Image: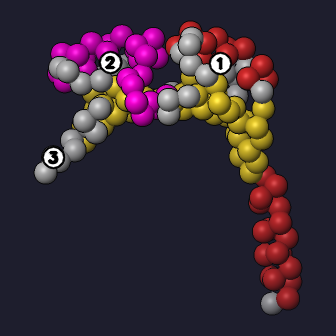
Amino acid sequence: MRRFLYALIALMLVLPAAAEDVEISFSQLPEKAQKIVLKAFPDTKIKKVDMERRASLIQYEVKLAGGIKMQFSKDGAFTECECTKSAVPDMLIPQKIRSFVAKEFPGRTVMRIEHDSKLFDVVLNNGDELTFNSSYRLIDVDHVVQE
């Protein structure tokens, strides 16, 4: 029992060291990510940049004025953008998804987009969530029920 407690305590001490968030300067962000931020939001103030480490995973989070949050992979590839007061810039949304939203959800705007190698998740300004596969085909819709 005593060995189990020692092992548990050791594990509790090691795990927090494996997960770490470090604030960095914008210039320390991968160049690819810097270019995306500056092109998508040229006149928006950068408030904070964090490098997040989780075991072998490294990602970056950029917070901008106006409630904008962006995430990037360790090589600077764009993975997520969330806007609370305005729509996600068109340059961050694949053309096929933009066209689909314009046709099937007229008047709606994209407030959040997140993607990995297999899926794109999009949240519209009415709260509806759309999921597209890597070929930009719609595979799921979660409608928000309006009361």
User: Looking at the image, which is closer to me, 61 or 16?
Assistant: 61
Q: Quadrant of residue 107?
A: top left
Is 19 in front, or is 48? 48
Q: Label 3 amino acid?
A: Gln
**Amino acid type, label 1:** Ala
Instruction: State the residue position of label 1.
Output: 33
Q: Is residue 118 above or below residue 97?
A: below
Is 22 inside the magenta-drawn segment? no
Residue plotted at (17% across, 20% down): 106
Residue at the spot 23% in from the left edge and 16% down from the top edge: 102
Q: In which quarter of the image is residue 96?
A: top left
Nearer the N terminus, badge 2 or badge 1?
1
| Residue sitting at the far bottom | 1
**Residue picked out by circle 2:** 97
Q: Is residue 116 visible?
A: no
Q: Is residue 147 above or below residue 29?
A: below
Select label 3 or label 1 by which is in front: 3
Q: Which amino acid does label 2 sit on?
A: Ile
Residue 39 at what x, y percent from top left?
56, 9
User: Could you say which disc has been placed on residue 146 in the image?
Assistant: 3
Question: Which image quarter holds the N terminus?
Answer: bottom right
